[in-house]
Amino acid sequence: MEVAEKVDWGHAAALIGLDLAMSEGIKTVRFIHHEPASSDETIAEAEARAREYYERQRKTAREENLPFHEVDWCFAREGTSVEV
């Protein structure tokens, strides 16, 4: 896994970012990936894993009647712009 290989590069998995956003009430997150060797397929797979994780967290919260903070998130792509 790339995160483990580059632990001191400032990388973090999207799942960690989602956990942080959900626990801290962060409204919007745009994940970026800057490893030129990663294929579009590799990045799409990472986004799919993050989506599955987020939906699983939402479902669990709903089933257990726990609070859940919705986060507007996606993997940013070339041309993505964010208004601040």
Image (cartoon, helix red, strand yellow):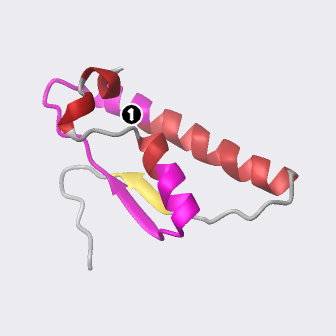
Question: Could you tell whether 71 is left or right of 80 in the image?
Answer: right
Q: Position of residue 72 (x, y in %)?
A: 49, 64
- The C terminus, quarter of image: bottom left
Q: Is residue 65 magenta?
A: no
Q: Amino acid under label 1? A: Ala
Please, which residue is most extreme toward the front here? Answer: 8
Residue extent of the magenta highlight: 18-46
Q: Which residue is mark 1?
A: 44
Question: Could you tell whether 67 is left or right of 41 in the image?
Answer: right
The secondary structure type at the circle numbered 1 is: helix
Q: Crowdedness of circle 1 by 10 Å Cα count: few (<14), some, many (20+)?
A: few
User: Which sits in the foreground, 72 or 5?
Assistant: 5
Up-down relation of residue 29 to residue 1 (above or below): below
Q: Residue at x 81, y 56 (%)?
A: 62
Q: Residue at x 50, y 40 (%)?
A: 50
Question: Could you tell whether 12 is left or right of 18 in the image?
Answer: left
Q: Position of residue 81 (x, y in %)?
A: 23, 66
Q: Residue at x 67, y 47 (%)?
A: 57
- The N terminus, quarter of image: top left
Q: Position of residue 38 (x, y in %)?
A: 22, 26
Q: Is residue 27 magenta?
A: yes
Q: Residue at x 17, y 32 (%)?
A: 35
Q: Quadrant of residue 29?
A: bottom left
Please, which residue is most extreme toward the bottom here? Answer: 84
Please, which residue is most extreme toward the left here? Answer: 36
Question: How many badges with numbers are in the image?
Answer: 1
